[in-house]
Image (tube, rainbow, N blue to C red):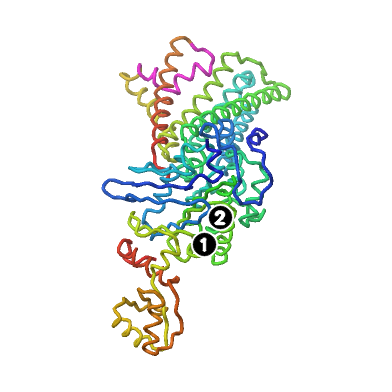
Amino acid sequence: MTATETHIPARAERPVGLPAPSRAADGRPGVPLPRLVTVELRKMIDTKAGLWLLLIMSAVSAIVVTVFLIWGPAVEATFGTLLTLASFPLLVLLPILGIMSATSEWSQRTGLVTFTLEPRRGRAITAKVIASLILGLVVTASGFAAAAIANVIGASTSDASGAWDVTWQTALGVTLAFAIFVLQGLAFGFLFLNTPFAIVASLVLPTVWSIASGLVSSIETASRWLDLNQVTEPLLNGTMTGENWGQLGTSFGVWVLLPLAVGSWRVLHREVK
Amino acid sequence: MWSATWEGRLATMITVENLTKRYGSFSAVDDISFEVRPGSVVGFLGPNGAGKSTAMRMMTGLTPATSGRATVLGKAYRDLHNPGRQVGVMLDASAQHPGRTGREVLRLAAIQIGVPRSRVDEALALVGLTDEEAGRRVRNYSLGMRQRLGLASALLGQPEVLILDEPANGLDPQGIHWMRGLLRGFADGGGTVLLSSHLLHEVQVIADDLVMIGRGRIVARGTKDELLSRGGTTVRSSDDRGLRAALDRAGVTVTQTPAGLVVDAESGVVGRVALDERIVLLELRSGGSEGLEEMFLSLTASTSREGTAA
C-alpha cells in the first residue's frame, strides 16, 4: 500500500474537513493506473460475496483433490491429474468474480462513487481487466500449489503415483485458460451489467452451444472453432497444434473480445444512476 | 496555469450553462444556468422529481447532458485531475455495496485518491462514526449512518468543493443540526458547497444563495437575503382584520398566513398604515422563513408532481 502514499503533496497540517489550500492539481486527468488496479483488485475480494466465493472455490478444490487421493485409482494420482481436478472448480467459479467486478458497479450502484472518483471510465475498465488477470494468476498459482502439496502428501502417505508429469506446455496452457475464463466473466459482466443475467449467460450460453453442436452435425465443424470449452481442452492438456491456436483465437474473439468490446461501449456511454 | 486560479482568481467554483437533459420528449432538466461563488453555500431546492439529482449527475459527468455544459473549478468534471482531491461528491448515500464495511468503503476511496490511511480515521471522526460502527457492513447501516459515511467519503480528499445531493435525508433533527455546522465550518474555511434539498428549512439556515427548480426549470435564484426580502413583510397585530382592510385600502397585496399577514410592501409602509389606524403591532419583520416558505410553495406548487410541494 506504500505506492498509494507517494502522491500526497507535502503540506502543513490543517484542521480536518477544511479544504486544503493547494494540491497536486496539475498533470494529466485521471488517477494513476496502479492505484486504480489496487482498488479494483481489493474490491473483488473485500465484500462478503467475493470472500465467500474465494473460500468456496478453495474448499471445493480441496475436497475434490482429497476425495480423489483417498478413493481414486492410485496409479493415476499424479501432479497432472490433481492439477486438472483442482483447476476445474476454479475455472468454473473464477469468472463469477470477474462478473461481479463488472456488474456490482451497476447492481449495487457503487458506480456512482467509482465513476466520480475516476470520471474517465475507460481507465476504470482497463483497471478491472488488469485486476482480473492478476487475480486469475494468483488463483492459478494457488491451484498449482494445492495440486503440488496434494501430490507430495499422496505419494508419501499412500501408494499414489506422485509423478511430476506436467509439461511447461500444460502449465502455460492452464494459466492461459484461467486468464481466458476470468476475462470472459468480466466481458459478460460488462455486456449485461446485471449479476444474475451475466452469470446465467456465461454458464448457460457456452453449454447450450456445446450441446447444440453435438446434436446438430451441420454446426459441428463451426463449433470446433467457436466452442470455448472444446478449444481449451488441448490447451489444458498441453497438446496445442497450429490449428488449435487458430480455433482458440477465434473462440476467444467471439466469446471474450466481442462481449468485452460491446460491454465496454455500454459502460462508457451508460448513464450512472 | 491552474495554480493561479486557486489563489482566488477563479470567479466561480461551479458554473452551469444552459444545462439540459431530455429523455425522449420529457425534459428532466430544462435549460438551467447558475453559478456558485467561492466560499459560498448554495442550496439547490426543488420538490421531488424536479431534476435536482439529474442536474447534479450532469455536473459530475455521470449523466451526459443533452445540451449545455457544466464546469467545476473551471473545467469539465471529467478533465479534473484526481477529482476526489478537488471535489467531494455524494449523490446517493444508499449507493454503497452492502457487503463492505464502512471503513473499507473509505479505505478504497483513500487508496484511489491517494491520501494516507490516517485520513480515513480523521474522516470517520469528523462525521461521528465510531470504530465499532465503521467495522459494520453497510447492509446494517441506517440511512442516517449511510449519509454520514457518504459525507466522510466526500470530505476524505480535503476537497475545495462539495456537491451533495440531499445530504440531510434520513438524519434526525440533531443530525441535521450537526450537518449544518459541519458544512458551515467547511464554507467558513474557504470551501464551497452545493447541496440539494426538497425541504427549504433544511438549507435556509446555512445557505448563502438559493437556486429553486421545479419541473426541470429554474423558478428563482439569488442570494438568500434577496429572496427573503422578496417574501414581503410579515406582520401580526392586535387587529389583523382591521389592518388587512386598511392595507387593502392602501392598495398593497396582503396574504393571510398562519404566522400572520404577509404584505407585499416594505415594513415602513405597513407600520405607517398601522399607526394611522391606531392598531397595535405585535410583530413586524421583513421576509422571514414563512415568506420564503410561502414563495417556495407557490413557486413549486404549479410545477410539482403532487400539486403541493412536500
Q: How many marks?
A: 2
Q: Does the magenta stretch include residue A234?
A: yes
The answer as to whether the residues below labels 2 and 1 share one chain is yes
Camera-side residue: B147 or B88?
B88
What percent of the width, then of the height, locates residue A217?
32, 19
Where is residue A180 drawn, in percent x and y? 49, 24
Compute the Cα span from label 2 to label 1: 10 Å
Q: Report the residue marked by disc 2.
A: B187
- The chain letter for the residue carrying disc 1 is B
Amino acid marked by disc 2:
Ala
Span shown in magenta: A221-240
Q: Which residue lies furthest to the right in this view?
A: A156
Q: Do the residues labelled 2 and 1 touch (CB within 8 Å)?
A: yes
Image point (61%, 46%), residue name: A20
* Nearer to us in this view, A92 or A192: A192
Q: Is mark 2 on a helix, strand or loop?
A: helix
